[in-house]
Image: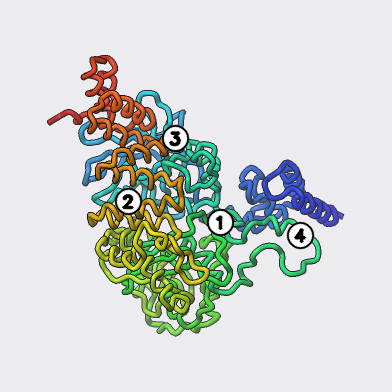
Amino acid sequence: MKSVISSARRLTALLALSLAGCGGSAPAEELLEAQQGAKPGRDAAGAAGGLDRDRIPGSMRPCYVCHREVVDTYLRTHGMAGGVGKVGTPPPGVVVNPRSDNRYEISTDARGAWLTATFPDGGKRVQRLVGRVGRGVFDTSWVGTEVDLLTGEDTGRLFFAPVETITGHGHVLSPFELVETSPGLDEALGESCLTCHTDTDLGKLAGAAVAEGSESARHVFPPNALGASAFEEIEAPSCSACHGDPAAHLELMPGPVHGGIGLDRLGEQPAGRQRDVCARCHLQGDARIDLAGAQIAHLATPRDLPLGARIPALVPARQGDDFRFVGQLERLALSACFLGFPEMTCGTCHDPHRGVAAQGLESFEATCAGCHDCSRDPALEVAQVTGEQARTATACVDCHVRRSQPFDLPHVRSADHFIRRRAPRPENDVPHRPFADREGALEIFDDGRLAERLRGPGGERWRSGVMAMGLLILGRTEEAARHFEVFPAPGTAAARAASAPAGFVPFETSPIFHRMRARSLIVTGRFQEGEAALSDALALDPLAAGVLIERARLRFATGDVAGAFADSQTVIDDYPGSEEPWELRAAMAERLGRPDVAVEAFAASTERWPSNAVSWYKLGLLLEQRGESERARRAIERARLLQPSIDRP
C-alpha cells in the first residue's frame, strides 16, 4: 500500500511540475515537501533521510522530485555542487606578501567576516567577505566587497581576496598575488571568473549594475559590480549545466516516450560531445578564447560541432611533465589510453554525479582492469615509483595517474590526467608560474575534430584569430599583430563580415576580438586604426562600456576632446554607478583649465569608488584652491587614511 501511495504522489508531482515549469513555484515546493515525506531514501554515505529541502538549490528542486538519490549524491559529494556559496566562517589568520610587505588579515566578528589590508606606509583598506569559490576539497578562494572606511557602507563591487585557504595547510597568498604585477585587493571578480562555478545569470542579480534596457550579464559595468548580496543568490551548477533546460523534459514526462525525453542523456551522446560538456570547465590552456560570451548553462553548442568552435584554447605545442590545476582534458589527450581509444570520455572513468573521493579508487581501478592486465614486477614496490605507500592492492592509479603539485596552484596536489606507463615521480614544490610556456610554441587544442573543419582560407583565418587573441593575452604583442593583419582593415564593412567555417563563431562578429585588436594596434602606435577597431566593437555591441571608456581615453590622448566627452557621457548615462567616466572627465577638465568641472568630476568619482586615494587628494587640492578649506581637509584626510604617504616627497 505504501508503494502505491508513493507512486501516486510522484505522478501528481510530475503532472504539477509539468504545468508549473521548473522555476520553484509554490505548487512545486508543496509537492516536493510531500514527496520528501514519502520516501526516506539514502545518500551516498548510507545515511538515511536525504537532504533538507532548504539545502536543495531552487533550480534543482524539480529534478529532486524524481531523481532524489542522484541529486543527494551530487550535492553531498561533488566538488562542483559546493563550488560557490556564501562565505560561512573563514578561519582567522594573517598573511604578509614578502615582495610588497602588504599585510592581509582575515577576521570575524558579530557583523561578519572581514579582510583588512595594511600597506607599508600604514594605509588601510577593508573588504567584507561575502562569498567563497571552491568547496574546500583543495582550497577555498574568498570573495569580498569593498567597504567605505568612514561610512562602513558596502560598495557592491566584488573582488577575489589576495589570501585563500588551502585545505590542511591554512592561509596562503592567492596565485595572482604571487606575481610581480599583482593587483592586490583590486582583483575584480566578474562573469569570466564565475563562468565555470555557476549557471546563474549574473545580469539578473538584484544588485548587478546592468545598463538600462539590458538583461545580459555581459552588460554589467563595472564587471564586478554584482552587489554585496550576490552570493546569496548565486547557485552552483545544477542539473541543467550538463543536461540542458529541464522544461521540455517536464512536459514530456511521465508517459510514453517517443523520440526522446527532452534532455540530453550524456552517455548516449557521441564521445566528443560528452567531452565538450566537461571541457567547458576542465580545459583552460595558456589562453582560452571565450567567443560564446555566456555562462555554462547557455552554451548550447550545435550537436555536430566541437566546443572548440566557440571556446578555443591554446596549449603548448610541446608538453612538459608538469601540469596546470584546470587542465584535465588537455592532459588526458596526451595519454596512450586516449590516443588508442578516441571514444574515451571523462565518463569512462568518472561518475559525473559523484565526487572522486566518494567514488573511490577501486572504481577507477576496475575501469583500468577492463582493458589492462597489471604487468608490474612483484619486486617493484609502489613506493619506489611514487615515494609513498600504495593506497590499494593493485595501485593502478598510484603508479599511472601521478599526483603532483600543479605549477599554477602551490601547496596542493591533484591528479595529472596524462596517464602513462612510466610516469615521472611526483613533485611537491614546483615553482609557481601562471602559464605552462609563456614564450613557447602554441597550438589550438584539438581532440581530433577541429583540423579537418579548419582546412581552407576561412579556417586558416579563424586559426589566426585564435592565435592573435591568445598571444595578446600572453603579452606577445608583436606576434599577435602579425596574426591580426590577416583580417580586413579595421573600420571597414569587411572587418565585420563573417568568414569562419560553417558553424564556427566568426571573429569578425565578436566585439571582444575587435577590442583586443585595438589594443594590439594602440600598443604599436597605430592610434587611428586602433580607434577604428574600437568603433567596430561598438558597432556590434553599443552597450560595451569598457570599449567606450577605451575609445574615450584614446580620443582624449589624440586630441579629440569632443569625441572623448561624448563617449564618457554615454557611459555616465547608461552606467551611473561607474567612476571611470568621471575620472576621465576630471582629467579632461584639468587639461582644459576648468577646475570647477574637475571638482565636480572628482567628487562624483569618489562617491562611486571611495577607495581611490589619488582622486581624494586631487579633489582636496582643488578645493583648497577654491577656498573651501573644511571640505578640502576632509578630502585630504580620506586620501591619507588610504595612503598616508600620498603627499610625501
Q: Earlier in the sequence, mark 2 or mark 4?
A: 4
| Residue 21 position within the rendered picture, expressed as x and y whole percent measured from the top left | 71, 50
Amino acid marked by disc 2: Glu
Q: Which residue lies most toward the right here?
A: 1
Q: Which residue is at a point 58% across and 61% down the rendered structure image?
A: 242
- Provide the secondary structure element on which disc 1 rests: helix
Q: Are discs 2 and 4 less than 8 Å apart at CB?
A: no
Tell me the residue that label 3 is attached to. Answer: 573
| Residue 236 position within the rendered picture, expressed as x and y whole percent measured from the top left | 54, 50
Circle count: 4
Q: Which residue is at a point 31% across and 58% down the rendered structure image?
A: 434
Residue 10's disc is: none
Is residue 464 or residue 635 the one in the foreground?
464
Tell me the residue that label 1 is attached to. Answer: 298
In the image: residue 52, left or right of residue 369: right
Is residue 379 or residue 67 the one in the foreground?
67
Q: How is the image coloured?
A: rainbow
**Real-space Cα distance between discs 2 and 4?**
54 Å
Tell me the residue that label 4 is attached to. Answer: 253
| Tag nearer the camera, 2 or 1 | 2
Q: Earlier in the sequence, mark 1 or mark 4?
A: 4
Q: Is residue 583 above or below residue 247?
A: above
